[in-house]
Image (cartoon, rainbow, N blue to C red):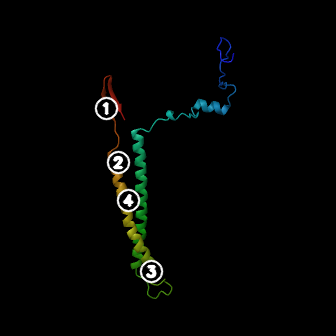
Amino acid sequence: MAGSLALGSVAPPARAQEPTPEAATPAAEMQRWQGFVHNPDPEAVAPPTELQRWQAKRRSLQLATGLFGGFMAATFVTGATLLAWFFWPRHSDCFDCGGDAFGESITMMVMLPTAAALAIPTGVFGAQLRRQERERPSARLRVLPGGLQIQF
């Protein structure tokens, strides 16, 4: 009968056999011993701790502050240099000097306000970075029934 379960009539299910150590390739064996075997289980990855989240936020704030500060410094130095070049005394007998330095004056009028505008996000990200530095996670001491616990 097809639906009966008599003793000895049903064969045990076939299981996938793991490769024997003799059948494993040397590269797979090396990875297994070094602990580099890929684990597809998403639960095996530990969630980031409070300190790791704080460090990631700190790195992003440092990057934003540095980029905006660098662009601000570059545009300010360029505008100040062109301002100095605009008022630098020139020889009046110069035949091919480029006229009245129209390009330098326009560039200077664009660069200096741009540097002032870039000071705003630089200050905002710098203030956030300082506030975040003050809120650095520290170790906490807890009294538990079994003794003391230090939690980072």
**Residue hosting label 1:** 141
Secondary structure found at label 2: helix
**Residue hosting label 2:** 132
- Given contact means CB atoms under 8 Å apart, are the residues at marks 3 and 4 in contact? no
Amino acid type for the residue under numbered disc 1: Leu
Quarter of the image holding residue 16?
top right
Secondary structure found at label 4: helix
- Foreground: disc 1 or disc 4: 4
Residue 121's disc is: 4
Sequence order check, earlier mark of 3 and 1: 3
Locate residue 56, reporting x and y percent.
43, 46
Sequence order check, earlier mark of 4 and 2: 4
Locate residue 110, reporting x and y percent.
41, 72
Query: Quarter of the image containing the N terminus?
Result: top right
Locate residue 22, reporting x and y percent.
69, 25
- Foreground: disc 3 or disc 4: 4
- Given contact means CB atoms under 8 Å apart, are the residues at marks 1 and 2 in contact? no
Quarter of the image holding residue 142?
top left
**Residue hosting label 3:** 102
Amino acid type for the residue under numbered disc 4: Pro
Kindly identify the residue that appears in the image at 43 percent across and 69 percent down: 78
Secondary structure found at label 1: strand
Secondary structure found at label 3: helix
Amino acid type for the residue under numbered disc 3: Phe
Locate residue 53, reporting x and y percent.
41, 43
Q: Residues within 10 Å of mark 3 (few under 14, many from 20)?
A: few
